[in-house]
Image (cartoon, helix red, strand yellow):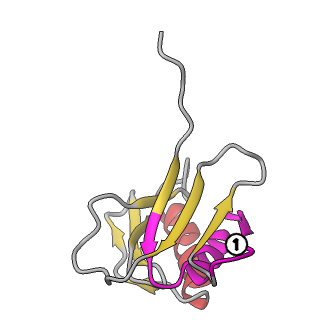
Amino acid sequence: MASVKQFQVTFDCAEPVCVARFWSEVLGYVVTLPTEGEGAWAVCADPTGAGPRMYFQRVPEGKVAKNRVHLDVRVGTGLVGEERLAALEAECARLVLLGAVHVQTLYDGNDSCIPMLDIEGNEFCLD
């Protein structure tokens, strides 16, 4: 049987330190900043070690297309209907104050999802 592998999620971005700080606030992670390199990279990691490490690296080009992969921030797990929607909307409001953009709210009376953009326009969802 194959062993379970750890992984990190890597983001190409213009301002690694800013994006790392944003995601650390979203997820409750801890930021590690470089001592050299003038902000060419930054890391945020789950202080419990349960979640994946996130690495942010400066690249010269900007984002030009939709993400092929995105993060789902699981804030409504186990909730349904209005209770789930309320939990997602509360988290959405908190993240908008951090600089995220609310794209739309998807709700069918039972299930809900809120697509958003982070501070550099990367798509993610509140789920």
| Residue 116 left/right relative to 76 | left
**Within 10 Å of the Cα at label 1, are there few (<14), some (14-19), or many (20+) other Cα atoms?**
few
Identify the residue at horizontal 35%, vertical 67% (top origin). 107
- Look at the image and tell me whether residue 127 can be seen: no
Residue extending farthest to the front is 36
Give the number of callouts: 1
Residue 63, image quadrant = bottom left
- Percent coordinates x, y for residue 96 in the rendering: 54, 87
Q: Is residue 14 magenta?
A: yes
Measured as percent of width and height from the top left, residue 125 is found at 42, 66
Q: What residue sits right under mark 1 in the picture?
A: 34
Give residue 17's quadrant in the image.
bottom right
Which of the pair 79/22 is nearer the observer?
22
Secondary element at tag 1: loop
Residue 49 visible in rendering: yes
The percent coordinates of residue 117 (x first, y second) are 41, 79
Rendered residue at 66%/70% (across/down): 24
Q: Amino acid at mark 1?
A: Pro
Magenta range is 11-37
Judge by depth and name the residue closer to the eye, 53 or 113.
53
Q: Is residue 64 left or right of residue 74?
A: left
Measuring 44% from the left and 86% from the top, which residue is drawn there? 101
**Left or right, residue 43 beside residue 7:** right
Q: Is residue 123 magenta?
A: no
Above or below 81: residue 5: above
Residue farthest to the top, as pictured = 1
- Image coordinates of residue 115 in percent, x first then y, are 37, 72
Given residues 92 and 57, the one toward you in this image is: 57
Q: Residue furthest left?
A: 65
